[in-house]
C-alpha cells in the first residue's frame, strides 16, 4: 500500500474507532470518563473490572473526578479540546498528588486570596456551602460571594466546572 493510500485509509477511520484502538493499546485497565465521572469508553481489561466490581469502581471514579482523593484508586489524566475539558483518561493507581497540592497550585495560578483558598479547599473536599460556612464560621452568603470570585478567577460558571478545572491546573 502506498503512503498516500495509507493516509487516505487513516483519515476515514472514525474518531470513535481510533479512540477505542488507542484504549486497547494501553496495558491494563483504561477508561475514558466524562467530567461527572461517568464511563464513556473502556478497554477490554477495564470492561472486565466493571463487570466484576462495577458499582464500587463507578463510585470511586465519580468521587475522584469530584476531587475526593482520600481513597482514590485512580490516576486521572485530563483530556482537552483546545481550552475545553472533555473528561479524563482514568487508570488504576494511586494519585501522586493530594487535594491540598491541587488547591495550592490552583490558588497560585488563579491568584486567590487566603480566604478564597480556604473555601476552595473545602469545596474540593465535597463540602456543601452550608458546611463550608459553618467550618469557617461565616454566613452562606459570604461563601456564595467567595465562590463567585473563585469562579471568575478560574473562568468557570459552576461548581462542577470548578472541580473539573482543578485537574487542569
Image: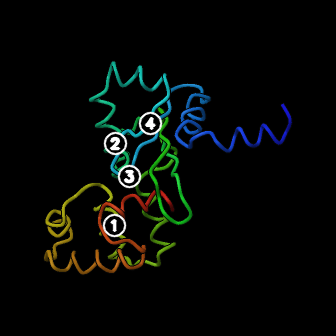
Q: Which residue is mark 3?
A: 35
Report the residue at 41% width, 19% height from top: 48
Return the disc, 2 or 1, that comes first in the chain's sequence. 2
Q: Which residue is mark 1?
A: 120
Report the residue at 50% width, 32% height from top: 30
Give the camera-side residue of 19 and 14.
Answer: 14
Return the disc, 1 or 4, that comes first in the chain's sequence. 4
Give the camera-side residue of 69 and 2.
Answer: 2
22 versus 146 height, above or below: above
* Mark 4: secondary structure: strand
Report the residue at 76% width, 42% height from top: 7
Report the residue at 35% width, 45% height from top: 37
Mark 3, other Cα within 10 Å: few <14 / some 14–19 / many ≥20 = many
Q: Which residue is mark 2?
A: 38
Q: Tell me where residue 125 sits by quadrant.
A: bottom left
Q: Which residue is mark 4?
A: 41
* Mark 2: secondary structure: loop
Mark 1, other Cα within 10 Å: few <14 / some 14–19 / many ≥20 = many
113 versus 51 height, above or below: below
Relative horizontal placement of residue 87, taking residue 137 as reference (left or right): right
CB within 8 Å, label 2 to label 1: no
Q: Position of residue 72 (x, y in %)?
A: 39, 39
Q: Nearer the viewer, mark 1 or mark 3?
A: 3
Image mark for residue 51: none
CB within 8 Å, label 3 to label 2: no
113 versus 166 height, above or below: below
Amino acid at each position: 500500500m502506498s503512503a498516500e493510500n495509507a493516509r487516505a485509509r487513516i483519515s476515514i477511520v472514525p474518531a470513535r474507532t481510533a479512540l477505542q484502538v488507542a484504549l486497547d493499546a494501553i496495558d491494563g485497565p483504561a477508561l475514558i470518563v466524562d467530567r461527572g465521572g461517568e464511563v464513556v469508553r473502556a478497554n477490554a481489561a477495564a470492561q472486565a473490572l466493571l463487570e466484576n466490581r462495577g458499582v464500587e469502581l463507578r463510585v470511586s471514579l465519580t468521587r475522584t473526578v469530584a476531587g475526593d482523593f482520600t481513597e482514590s484508586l485512580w490516576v486521572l489524566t485530563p483530556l482537552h479540546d483546545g481550552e475545553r475539558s472533555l473528561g479524563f483518561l482514568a487508570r488504576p493507581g494511586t494519585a501522586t498528588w493530594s487535594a491540598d497540592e491541587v488547591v495550592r497550585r490552583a490558588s497560585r495560578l488563579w491568584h486567590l486570596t487566603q480566604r478564597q483558598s480556604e473555601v476552595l479547599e473545602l469545596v474540593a473536599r465535597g463540602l456543601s456551602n452550608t458546611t463550608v460556612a459553618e467550618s469557617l464560621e461565616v454566613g452562606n452568603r459570604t461563601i456564595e460571594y467567595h465562590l463567585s470570585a473563585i469562579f471568575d478567577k478560574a473562568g468557570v460558571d459552576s461548581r462542577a466546572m470548578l472541580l473539573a478545572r482543578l485537574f487542569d491546573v
